[in-house]
Image (spheres, helix red, strand yellow):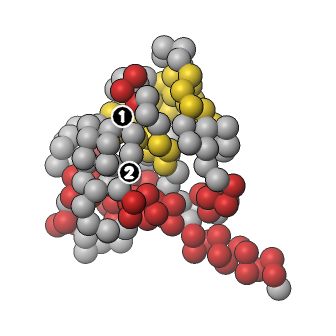
Amino acid sequence: MKINGKAHKFGNHINTDDIIAAKYLDSQDDSFLGSKCMENIDAGFIGRVRSGDIMIAGDNFGCGSSREHAPVSIMGCGIALVIAKSFARIFYRNSINRGLPILVCAKVDQIKNGDSLDIDLEEGTIKNLTTGKIFKSEKFPEFMQEIIEAKGLISWIKKKSRRKR
C-alpha cells in the first residue's frame, strides 16, 4: 500500500483529548468527529488538511484514554496515515482495528510541516519529496496490512469468515 500526501506536524505526547475533545464523544459520525479533529491544539488544522494527507508526531502519540474516537476523527478529517516516533499502545491497536495505518519512525524530526511525502507501507519507506531524503520505518506486518486494506478489524474478520464457507 502506498500513500502520498502533505505532512501536518505535531509535537510529543499528543493525547486523545487533544485529538478529539471529550465533549464530542456522544457522536459516532466519522465526518463530524473529523471536523473537530485537533481543534484544541490547532484550530486551523481542519481548514488545511486534505484527503490523503499525513499526520506527523513525536513521542507517545495517542496517550491518555482508550477511546476509539481518536483514530476515527483522524480518518474522518481525511488523514491517510500517522507517522510518529512512538505511539501509546492502546491507540496503536485502536488505529489498526479501525483501519488507520500508523508507522513508527525515529527520524520524524527531519520532516517539516508541509513537506510532501511518499510512503510505501510494505517496504517501510518514507520518501520526503520536498527534501529528497528517504527514511526507513518499521514495516507493517502482512496481517496488519490486510486489516488496513479491509478498512478495519471487523471487516477483515467478516472477509476471512466468508472465505472459510
Residue 28 figure quarter: bottom left
Q: Nearer the viewer, mark 1 or mark 2?
A: 2
Of residue 28 and residue 163, the one placed in the foreground of this image is 163
The residue where tag 1 is placed is 8
What kind of residue is marked 1?
A: His
State left or right for residue 94 relative to residue 161: left
Rendered residue at 25%/48% (across/down): 14
Rendered residue at 57%/70% (across/down): 153
**Secondary structure type for disc 1:** strand
State left or right for residue 129 relative to residue 156: left
Are there few (<14), some (14-19), or many (20+) residues within 10 Å of tag 1? Answer: many
Query: Where 80 falls versus 137 (above or below)?
Result: below
Residue 53 visible (yes or no):
no
Q: Which numbered disc flags the more N-terminal residue, 1 or 2? A: 1
For the residues labelled 1 and 2, say whether their Cβ atoms are less than 8 Å apart: no
The residue where tag 2 is placed is 87
Where is residue 144 drawn, in percent x and y?
A: 61, 58
Rendered residue at 51%/22% (across/down): 128
Residue 13 visible (yes or no):
yes
State left or right for residue 53 relative to residue 121: left
What kind of residue is marked 2?
A: Phe
State left or right for residue 33 relative to residue 2: left
Give me the C-alpha separation between circle 1 and circle 2: 17 Å
Where is residue 119 drawn, in percent x and y?
A: 58, 34
Where is residue 15 drawn, in percent x and y?
A: 24, 54
Of residue 66 and residue 36, the one placed in the foreground of this image is 66
Rendered residue at 18%/43% (across/down): 41
Residue 70: give its label: none
Of residue 38 and residue 106, the one placed in the foreground of this image is 106
